[in-house]
Amino acid sequence: MSQNAIFEPFFATIFLTFVVWVYMYIRRISYIKSHKIRPQDLAVPKASVQTWPSTVVTPSDNLKNLFEMPILFYALVLYLFMTQQVDRIYVYAAWVFVIFRTLHSIVHCTFNCIMLRFYLYLVATITVWFIAIRAAFAYWST
């Protein structure tokens, strides 16, 4: 298997972050325009968004979330590539991570069913830990 195959899910995760970022701004700008909010009213972000509906706030929360666990994923992908350890199992696991993070983002940014979102997040996170533990065992066994 080509070592470069690990970059397909890597860039898919980056693209997911971009899509959520665009969606967040679409929701925010739409809300700001429809409610005629003045830019200076947004000077203190936390105070201004506390009254906003969840449909406007959750995409921002999801974007923040995409800078948590995925950071470990990015680091692991780079580690696996640099150490020439990429194999079919890592690539499949990386795609599992991408699929479940994408589903998590869809749920979070739309109907936000907490328990469904939790299980999607759990599967994605367990996948990252699987990649990390497998890579660590490979490192320690050399």
Image (spheres, rainbow, N blue to C red):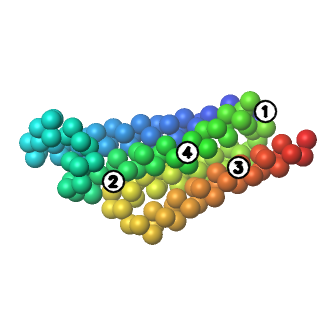
Q: Amino acid at mark 1?
A: Thr
Q: Which mark is residue 50?
A: none
Q: Amino acid at mark 4?
A: Pro
Above or below, 54 against 87 in this view is: below
Q: Position of residue 22 (x, y in %)?
A: 33, 38
Characterize the local packing of mark 2: few (<14), some (14-19) or many (20 or more) Cα atoms within 10 angstroms. Answer: many
Q: From the image, which quarter does the N terminus lie in? A: top right
Q: Amino acid at mark 2?
A: Thr
Distance of label 4 from label 1 (alpha carbons): 20 Å
Distance of label 4 from label 2 (alpha carbons): 18 Å
Q: Earlier in the sequence, mark 3 or mark 4?
A: 4
Location of mark 2 (residue)? 58
Q: Which mark is residue 83?
A: 1
Location of mark 4 (residue)? 70
Location of mark 3 (residue)? 131
Distance of label 3 from label 2 (alpha carbons): 28 Å
Mark 1 lies on a secondary structure that is loop
Tell whether 115 sits left or right of 58. right
Distance of label 3 from label 4 (alpha carbons): 12 Å
Characterize the local packing of mark 3: few (<14), some (14-19) or many (20 or more) Cα atoms within 10 angstroms. Answer: many
Mark 3 lies on a secondary structure that is helix
Q: Amino acid at mark 3?
A: Ile
Above or below, 127 against 141 in this view is: below
Q: Position of residue 111 (x, y in %)?
A: 33, 62
